[in-house]
Amino acid sequence: PKEDPTRSSAGYRFLMGDRNFLGLVAIAGFGIASFFVYLSSSSFILIDHYGLSPSVYSVFFSINAVAFIGMSQLTGLLSERFGLKRVVWVAVTGYATTMVALFAIMATGVDRLDVMAALLFVGYGFLGLVIPTTSVLAMEEHGEIAGTASALMGTLHFAIGALAMGVAGVFFDGTPLPMVAGITLCAVISFALAKVTLGRSRQAVEAPAE
C-alpha cells in the first residue's frame, strides 16, 4: 500500500532529526560522491592525459566496476560472520587508507597509470562493501517508514555526490592530482563520519540502563 502523504511528511521530519540515520546515509553519500568525482574526470584524464583510446578506457572503467560489484556480493557473507558495523568500519578504513596512500604517492610527483589503477581497484573494492552495509544499517530501524527512508537516503546520496562533483570540477586541470584529491577528501570525510556514527551507536548500546 502507498504511504499517505501526511505520514510521509512526518516521516521525513523524523528522519532528518535522526543523527544515526543521517550519519549512516552520509557515510555512503561521501563514498558515492568519491565515485562521482572519478566519473566526471576520469575520461579526460585517462584519454587526454594518459593517452588511452576510448575502447581501452571503457575496459579500465569496467575493471573498477568489477571490483565494486564483486565485493558488494560478499556483503551478506561477511556481515553474517562479522556483523554489519564491523564490516562498515573495516571497509571505510580500508577505503580511506587506500585513497590517502594514492594521494600521497601522486602528490610526490609519481604520475603513473599502473599505480593509480591498482589503488583505485583496491579502493573501489572496499567501497563496494561500504554502501550496501550502511544502507542496511540506516534502514533497519525504520521498517514502518521504509519507503520514506529509502527515498530520503537516495536523495541525500545523489545530492552529496552532485555537490562533490561540482566542487571537484572547479579544480580540474587535466591532470590526475585534483581528481585523486577530491576522491581522497570524500573518503576521509566518510571515514570521519563512520568514526563518529559507529562510535555513537556503540556508546548507546553500552550505556547502562537507568
Image (cartoon, rainbow, N blue to C red):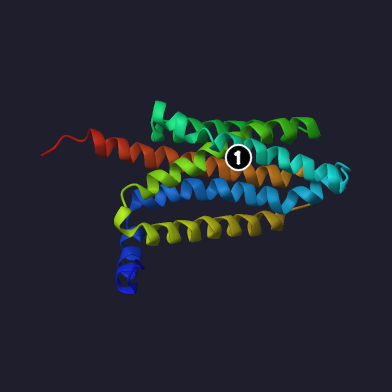
Sort mark 1 into few (<14), some (14-19) or many (20+) by Cα contacts within 10 Å. Answer: some
Of residue 115 and residue 55, the one placed in the foreground of this image is 55
Query: For numbered disc 1, what is the local secondary structure?
Result: helix
Q: How many marks?
A: 1
In the picture, which quadrant includes the N terminus?
Answer: bottom left
Residue 194, percent from left and from top: 44, 40
Q: Residue drawn 44% across and 47% down?
A: 135
- Asked whether, in this view, residue 204 is left or right of residue 148, the answer is left
Asked if residue 175 shows in the view, the reply is: no
Disc 1 target residue: 69
Q: Furthest residue to the top?
A: 81
In the picture, which quadrant includes the C terminus?
Answer: top left
Residue 50, percent from left and from top: 86, 41
Q: Residue drawn 30% across and 69% down?
A: 7
Residue 91, percent from left and from top: 51, 33
- Asked whether, in this view, residue 129 is left or right of residue 121, the answer is left
- Asked whether, in this view, residue 189 is left or right of residue 203, the answer is right
Q: Residue drawn 44% across and 43% down?
A: 134
Splitting the image into 4 quarters, where does residue 152 fall?
bottom left
Q: Furthest residue to the front?
A: 1
Of residue 148 and residue 155, the one placed in the foreground of this image is 148
Q: Residue drawn 72% across and 42% down?
A: 62
Residue 111, percent from left and from top: 80, 35
Asked if residue 155 shows in the view, the reply is: yes
Query: Label 1 sits on what residue type?
Result: Ile
Q: Furthest residue to the left?
A: 210
